[in-house]
Image: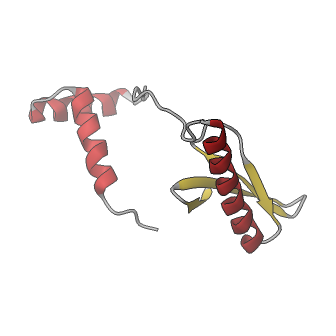
């Protein structure tokens, strides 16, 4: 999936060959906000405007703009991966949950390659 960022917000981006237009939506918010443009420049401008308008609306209405997450995540794994993680957690002396959390936190600290 192609994405763009502005003010810490992520916009998903797609292209409609039929309509010859780029379109997207702001991800991770409490609402549905779409944007579109016929060029990358128009799309970028529309995305920035959509974020700015959404934030202004949220401020005016006293709404928290970011989607809330519970922190609970159910991940489906193959039995072989589940076993491997269990063995690594035992070696580390921590629970499977703590091992997965620690591993993800470490991965998120790594620089993202583009």
24 and 20: which one is in front? 24
**What sort of colour scheme is used for the picture?**
secondary structure
56 and 109: which one is in front? 56
Res 79 quadrant in image:
top left
**Left or right placement of residue 98 versus residue 108 in this view:** left
Q: Residue at position x 57%, y 54% from top? A: 10
Q: Position of residue 74 (x, y in %)?
A: 43, 25
84 and 96: which one is in front? 96
Q: Position of residue 25 (x, y in %)?
A: 69, 49
Q: Is residue 102 above or below residue 108?
A: above
Res 7 quadrant in image:
bottom right
Q: Residue at position x 14%, y 29% from top? A: 94
Number of numbered labels in the structure image: 0
**Left or right placement of residue 29 versus residue 88 in this view:** right
**Left or right placement of residue 50 versus residue 21 in this view:** left
Q: Residue at position x 79%, y 59% from top? A: 36
Q: Is residue 92 above or below residue 47?
A: above
Q: Position of residue 83 (x, y in %)?
A: 26, 28
**Residue, far right:** 19
60 and 108: which one is in front? 60
Q: Residue at position x 26%, y 49% from top? A: 106
**Left or right placement of residue 11 versus residue 39 in this view:** left
Q: Position of residue 92 (x, y in %)?
A: 11, 35
Q: Quadrant of the N terminus?
A: bottom right
């Amino acid at each position: 999936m192609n994405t763009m960022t502005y003010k810490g917000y992520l916009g998903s981006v797609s292209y409609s060959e039929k309509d010859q237009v780029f379109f997207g939506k702001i991800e991770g918010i409490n609402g549905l906000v779409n944007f579109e443009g016929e060029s990358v420049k128009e799309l970028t401008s529309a995305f920035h405007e959509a974020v700015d308008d959404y934030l202004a609306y949220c401020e005016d209405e006293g709404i928290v703009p970011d989607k809330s997450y519970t922190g609970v995540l159910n991940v489906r794994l193959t039995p072989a991966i589940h076993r491997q993680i269990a063995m690594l957690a035992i070696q580390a002396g921590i629970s499977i949950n703590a091992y997965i959390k620690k591993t993800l936190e470490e991965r998120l600290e790594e620089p993202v390659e583009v």
